[in-house]
Image (spheres, helix red, strand yellow):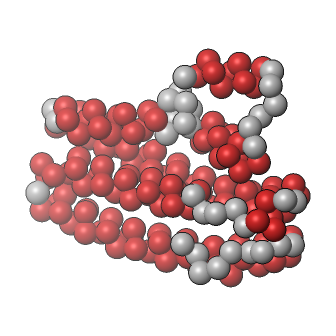
Amino acid sequence: EPAWYPTGGTEETSRWSREALAPWLREQQRSIQEEEARLFALAQAEPELQPMAAALDGALYESLVATLLAAPMPAAIDVDPELRAVYVEALWGSAEPILRRAAEIYTRCAESAAERGDDAWQGFCARHAHALSREGGAGVETLRREILARRVGPPPAGPAICFEGARA
């Protein structure tokens, strides 16, 4: 997790985004890129392991998004709708490109596994790619709404509830 969390104020939340969240994310992504290099080398040395290596790569990015979005909502921010919105947007702005990267990797993994006739990895990667896609219900925009609902409370009753229930 980032070294510290903001305790209040738009300025402090912005500073947190720059000074704690951004460096932490860069370090996490650097670590993932190091693992990607190892996985790529493994896939090059043993081509039959390529789908597994790609699946692990996608899982690294997916795990980073899960960790990022599970960050606690500081109490001082939670009580202020404006600060809460700034905080959620900072988290979301950081998570969205990582989520898209995970979905792209899983899609390529599924395609590669299908070309190799590897049904197990093809199924695994296709399920994960679909789950992160708009059609799978946890796509980028749907996931964003779900995160916002958890962070700022459920949507009001009415069509939004009907739509959310229809997805299940």
Question: Is residue 75 among the parts visible in the rendering?
Answer: yes
Q: Quadrant of residue 79?
A: bottom right
Depicted 47 relative to depicted 165: above or below: below
Please report the residue visible at 37 percent of the width from the left and 44 percent of the height from the top. Answer: 106
Please report the residue visible at 25 percent of the width from the left and 62 percent of the height from the top. Answer: 40
Please report the residue visible at 74 percent of the width from the left and 75 percent of the height from the top. Answer: 6
| Position in image of residue 52 (x %, y %) | 22, 50
| Position in image of residue 127 (x %, y %) | 37, 34
- Quadrant of the frame with the C terminus: top right
Task: Give whichever of 13, 37 is nearer the camera.
Answer: 13
Task: Give whichever of 77, 143 is nearer the camera.
Answer: 77
- Quadrant of the frame with the N terminus: bottom right
| Position in image of residue 3 (x %, y %) | 59, 81
Depicted 157 relative to depicted 115: above or below: above
Question: Is residue 14 among the parts visible in the rendering?
Answer: no
Please report the residue visible at 81 percent of the width from the left and 77 percent of the height from the top. Answer: 12
Q: Is residue 91 left or right of residue 87?
A: left
